[in-house]
């Protein structure tokens, strides 16, 4: 049996380890590249292209109706951090997702976050018209605010860190390379509530994995007859944004609500001649206003 020299064996082992490291690095590079491309496209090619219903439902998102319930803080091993791990305004991301559904044509989203400001501005308009010397201006009335037939509510219910972590490394004759990775997870709960009955019509869960990885290369060698030491270290790390991950989870939840709503008949396609335009569970009485006001979940 022929025995390979120890140096050749170590060299083969080093090359094999480097190949494994490159594979790990390439895998996470591809994941990050794919995620960045999705971010630039709003991660919503599928959400943007959902089929439009006959009647666009009017929905409302209140400031406290979609919030962070995890209480998770940013992790730090050196000192305490009081910053939260995720944004405290997830309702803004929810409104954004609703407005991008169907290229902005699926939902009609009414303003409820800044409702106080909206009400004050309408009061100023009424006051200005009452004080006007023009009789025609005094007779002009503001149109009623559009009301919603659906409330979208929910919460960020879980932010779990370090669900999976690991790495690999190799070193030979003072030259080394290593790769490490970590995976976190964020989960949201979202529900669709009928204003007419208060019934929870749909409830979905959506989650997104948050990727992080780092790589480093170093050289540790003695020179000049082992009297002087040279040490060089290089490295970098990449962490996926928790806000972007939350945005993707919310968009996934909105997409599931849309698809499940079609399955259960809450809305029908524009070219569908069967069935009713709106399910009775999400209809509300028509307000006392002009012809521009519409009934059902459109407001």
Image (cartoon, helix red, strand yellow):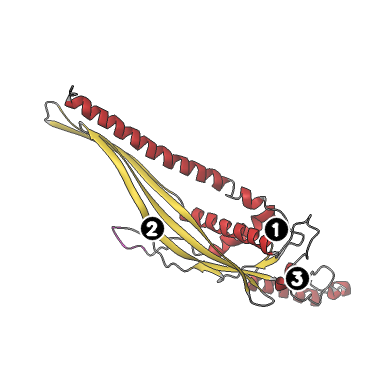
Q: Which residues are magenta?
A: 77-81
Question: Which residue carries the number 2 mark?
Answer: 161
Residue 296: mark in rendering: 3
User: Dot 1 surroundings within 10 Å: few (below 14), some, or many (20 or more)?
Assistant: many
- Label 3 close to label 2 by CB (< 8 Å): no
Q: Quadrant of the C terminus?
A: bottom right
- Label 2 close to label 1 by CB (< 8 Å): no
Gap between marks 3 and 2, in whole Å?
43 Å
Q: Residue at x 85, y 69 (%)?
A: 291
Question: Which residue carries the number 1 mark?
Answer: 106
- Give the structural element (helix, strand or loop) at label 3: helix
User: Dot 3 surroundings within 10 Å: few (below 14), some, or many (20 or more)?
Assistant: many
As drawn, the residue found furthest toward the top would be: 2
Gap between marks 1 and 3, in whole Å?
15 Å
In the rendered structure, which disc, 3 or 2, sits on the residue that comes first in sequence? 2
Q: Residue at x 41, y 64 (%)?
A: 72
């Amino acid at each position: 049996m022929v025995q390979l020299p120890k140096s050749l064996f170590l060299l083969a082992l080093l090359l094999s380890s480097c190949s494994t490291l490159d594979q790990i690095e390439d895998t996470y590079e591809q994941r990050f590249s794919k995620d960045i491309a999705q971010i630039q496209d709003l991660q919503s090619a599928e959400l943007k292209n959902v089929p439009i219903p006959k009647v666009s439902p009017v929905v409302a998102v209140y400031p406290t109706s979609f919030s962070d319930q995890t209480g998770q803080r940013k992790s730090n091993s050196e000192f305490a951090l009081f910053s939260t791990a995720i944004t405290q305004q997830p309702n803004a991301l929810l409104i954004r997702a609703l407005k991008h559904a169907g290229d902005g044509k699926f939902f009609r989203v009414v303003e409820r976050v800044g409702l106080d400001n909206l009400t004050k501005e309408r009061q100023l308009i009424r006051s200005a018209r009452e004080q006007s010397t023009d009789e025609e201006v005094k007779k002009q009335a503001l149109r009623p605010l559009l009301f919603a037939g659906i409330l979208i509510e929910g919460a960020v219910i879980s932010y779990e860190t370090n669900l999976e972590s690991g790495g690999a490394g190799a070193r030979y004759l003072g030259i080394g390379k290593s790769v490490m990775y970590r995976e976190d997870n964020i989960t949201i709960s979202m529900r669709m509530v009928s204003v007419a009955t208060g019934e929870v019509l749909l409830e979905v869960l959506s989650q997104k994995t948050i990727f992080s990885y780092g790589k480093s290369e170093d050289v540790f060698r003695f020179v000049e007859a082992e009297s002087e030491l040279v040490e060089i270290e290089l490295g970098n790390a990449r962490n996926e944004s928790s806000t972007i991950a939350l945005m993707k989870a919310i968009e996934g939840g909105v997409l599931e609500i849309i698809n499940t709503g079609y399955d259960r008949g809450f809305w029908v396609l524009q070219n569908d001649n069967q069935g009713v335009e709106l399910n009775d569970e999400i209809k509300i009485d028509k307000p006392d206003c002009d012809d521009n006001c519409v009934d059902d979940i459109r407001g």
